[in-house]
Image: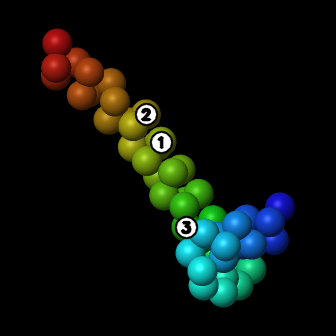
Amino acid sequence: MIAALARAISRATGTNVDLETVKILMIFSGAGLLVSLVAAMIYGQALNAALF
C-alpha cells in the first residue's frame, strides 16, 4: 500500500519519491492528527460553552 502511494505521488508530482520519505510523512501526519484530536477533545467543550 505504501509503495502504491509512493508511485501515485511520483506520477502526480513528476519527482522520484522514496518509500522512506512516504513513511516519514505518514508518521508525522498521523502524529499531527492525533494531537489535533486530543486538543479538540480537551478544548472542545470549553470552546462550545464559550460560544453559547
Q: Is residue 30 above or below residue 43?
A: below
Residue 47 spot, x, y in % from top left = 24, 28
The image shows residue 24 at horizontal and vertical percentages of: 63, 75
Residue 7: percent from left, percent from top: 74, 72
Seen at 48% across and 42% down, the residue is 37
Horizontal arrangement in the rendering, residue 7 relative to residue 44 (left or right): right
Separation of marks 2 and 1 at Cα, in angstroms: 6 Å
Tell me the residue at 72%/72% (across/down).
Answer: 6
Asked if the residue under mark 1 is in contact with the one under mark 2, i.e. CB atoms within 8 Å, the reply is: yes
Residue that mark 1 sits on: 37
Image quarter of residue 48: top left
Position of residue 42 relative to residue 49, above or below, is below
Which kind of residue does numbered mark 1 sit on? Leu
Measure the alpha-carbon separation of dots 2 and 3: 20 Å
Amino acid type of the residue that numbered disc 3 sits on in the rendered structure: Phe
Dot 3: element: helix
Q: Locate residue 18 relative to residue 52 in the image: left or right.
A: right
> Image height check: is 5 above or below 19?
above
Residue, disc 3: 28
* Among the two numbered marks 2 and 3 on one chain, the one whose residue lies closer to the N terminus: 3
Q: Residues within 10 Å of mark 1 (few under 14, many from 20)?
A: few
Q: Amino acid at mark 2?
A: Met
Q: Nearer the viewer, mark 2 or mark 3?
A: 3
Label of residue 41 in the image: 2
